[in-house]
Image (cartoon, rainbow, N blue to C red):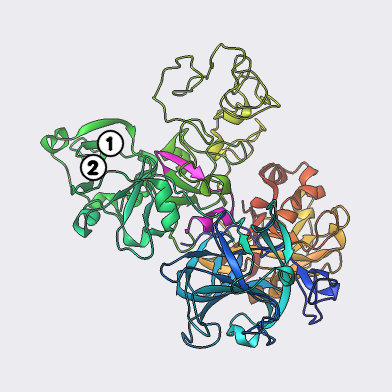
Amino acid sequence: MRFYLLAMVSLAVGCSRDPCDPGHGIVVNCTGVGGPSVVSDVGGGGTAIQLPFSEGESARCTQGTGGSYSHTGGSTQFGVDLDTPNDSDMELYAPVGGMAYVHTESATSGFGYHVAIDIGGGFYVVVAHLSEVFVENESEVTAGQLLGYEGCTGACSGDHVHIGLMEGDPSETAQFGESVDVLFRTADMNAESPAFEDVAGSALVCDLSSGHVYASDLPVGRWHPDGTLVKVPNDPKVYLVESGNARHIDDESVFWSYDWNFDDVVRVSDEELACLGTGEEIAREGSVDLGYGEDGHAWLLVKDTDGSAWKQRLPSGAADEVAESWGFSGDLGMDPIFSEATLDAYRTRSGTAPFRDGTILKESGRSDVYVVSDGVALPVKDWDTYLLMGYGERDILTVGDGLVAEAMGDNVGSCMAGIWCLDAEAVTSCGGGLEIGSGEMGGEEVGDDTDTGDGENTGDEEDTASPEEESDVDGDGIPDAVDNCPLHDNADQSDIDSDGTGDSCDADADGDEVPNGIDCDLFDASVGECAEEATDTGTDPVDEEDTGGGAKSDDAWSDYVWIDGDNLCFSADGFSFPYNAADAYMVGYGGSSLALDFTFKSDFRLVNSGDAYCLDTSVLDFDDYEVTLVSSLTSTGDTASSYADTGDWWDNYDFCVSGSETAAQFCAYQGGWNYLVGFSVATSGAHANGDGA
């Protein structure tokens, strides 16, 4: 299945064609040189468009606003041409995030091969004259994601890249769009003291011979966790990332012998491949087998890349799921019986087999997505990070609730606690990334039980750290000798269960004997493992006696979410100002396909009507959904420009302090990252399923 995190394209604009009209949601500076310059919050966190090169790369501006060569027309007037090498392929990256429309209609005219990245409200960013494009048409991209190679397709006399903001339909070729001035995030390398700043495109100094050189400030993907299969676009070689190095897989027979899948190979840049370093070539064929011993236990048998042969028992509660991560599917009962002699030929590994390194997985009832690396389930912090790693088209193994912890034990990260979290900092770090062991960047992989007193936690025992009082390994200002979590930045020394181990590195933060990975509330000992969803009996659990008129019970949950015929309604009462007056957007997913889009989509914009936001479920295509709302405004009353602006919306809802058990389960878990409600659409209408998180 595909993975869908809650996300929103970062511009919400109207349809005004006057760029100086603030009614369209983009802040405009109408005093810019050569015309209006549009300041747009594009790419999720900046106030300007990035240059489409890797951070630190630079290029000469050869033609800018009104350039006589080709920038006199309406579709090119405010565009910028940046010179690129004629004798090599320079990698280009998405300068903003959004939906990418790929145009390869003509290699000899106009913009040539180009990508139009839709940022909403009738605006898009065009990157043109590419020789190759690496993203699929109508796929979502994020800023810093590998886009293609520069080139000289279209109307072109030498390799360069054309970039600009356009108003129009991104599904049409850019010649039909209207060029708009915009700020670029860049540094003028011809300045006496170059510094990155936001500069109007119309203010750039551009000329074929005397144009200024401008540098990029765009962070790009430079790292993948161990277990990832990678390749660069212009070379058929496939590599396995292992111990931070790229190990070339000698040929297809070797590749297939380990039950790897070419669908799981991720395209990376030459820059990242160089960052990874070169590991030993994998030239030896191996094997991965699965079956039962004569004693009835299920075993995984592996002949590994280093020539070793080992076996490990499958976890009884997650045997099928772990087997699937190793390339097997179906009923384990159909697998062979291994003789004692066969098993004896493999060295036994202690414990049970975890999910295979490189696996991407999630639990069916939760939104967290993990990448397995070095035997640890690393949570992906957000959708942009997921896209930055090139995982947008990857299949995700979906397992039952609680099975991640069942298979991985304590080796499950938590972005909330800051432990083993895959975030943009890790992904954009050349050769650094996230090392398993400390739970943070810069750690070392450690052994399995003994605390040596050197500040490294080598197992499940409490980390006592070095006695040197001046030592502060995690840099949080607390000396290691008295730090309750010396390897994780935790200046507040929070320790909810008062067990002496700080919450930042406590595998059971609230001391309720439920591991963090499956605990519905990490900081409330009265809330343990998430309850399984009850089977839908055809009655409405929100309102036992469904009158069809939106009647509410005394339970706090149904005071805020209820069913009215085919309408799923969320009360507007209880939101702090200005949320209670704002429109809302429904976001989530349905069935096995995306049904409620990432973008601010008019189909799912709900108006506060009668003190409630109601969704007509009769127009939906699938049977089962998990959804929540996000506001069209931020907490300060501004137009929302990213999901982060409204991610705490439900936390500001009176429902979250209502005392309801369901509210407690939802509101304590990173606000809007959970889907607030799950429901089914059947012939009898919509029925609430309780907390869909």
The amino acid type, in three-letter code, at marker 1 is Gln
Residue ID at (69%, 41%): 668
Are the two marked residues, 2 and 1, in contact with CB atoms closer than 8 angstroms?
yes
What residue occupies the far front of the structure in this picture?
210
**Neighbourhood count class around disc 2 (C-alpha, 10 Å): few under 14, some 14–19, many 20 upward:** many
Can residue 117 be seen here? no
Residue 312's disc is: 1
Hey, what amino acid is under mark 2? Val
- Asked if the magenta segment contains residue 466, the reply would be no
**Quarter where residue 173 is shown:** bottom right
Indicate the position of residue 687 as horizontal and vertical percent values. 65, 62
Looking at the picture, how far across and down is residue 177, in whole percent?
66, 84
Residue 293 - label: none
Direction from residue 64 to residue 392 in the image, left or right:
left
For the point 87% across and 57% down, the residue is 578
Classify residue 355 as left or right of residue 163. Answer: left
Separation (CA) of disc 2 from disc 1: 9 Å
- Asked whether residue 353 appears in the rendered view, the answer is yes
Q: Which residues are magenta?
A: 373-390
Q: Position of residue 16 (x, y in %)?
A: 80, 80
Is residue 386 covered in magenta?
yes
Counting residues from the start of the chain, the first of labels 2 and 1 encountered is 2
Q: Nearer the viewer, residue 15 or 403?
A: 15
Dividing the picture into quadrants, the one containing residue 484 is top right
Residue 302 circle label: 2
Q: How many marks overall?
A: 2
Instruction: Specify the farthest residue to the left.
Output: 341
Q: Secondary structure at mark 1?
A: strand
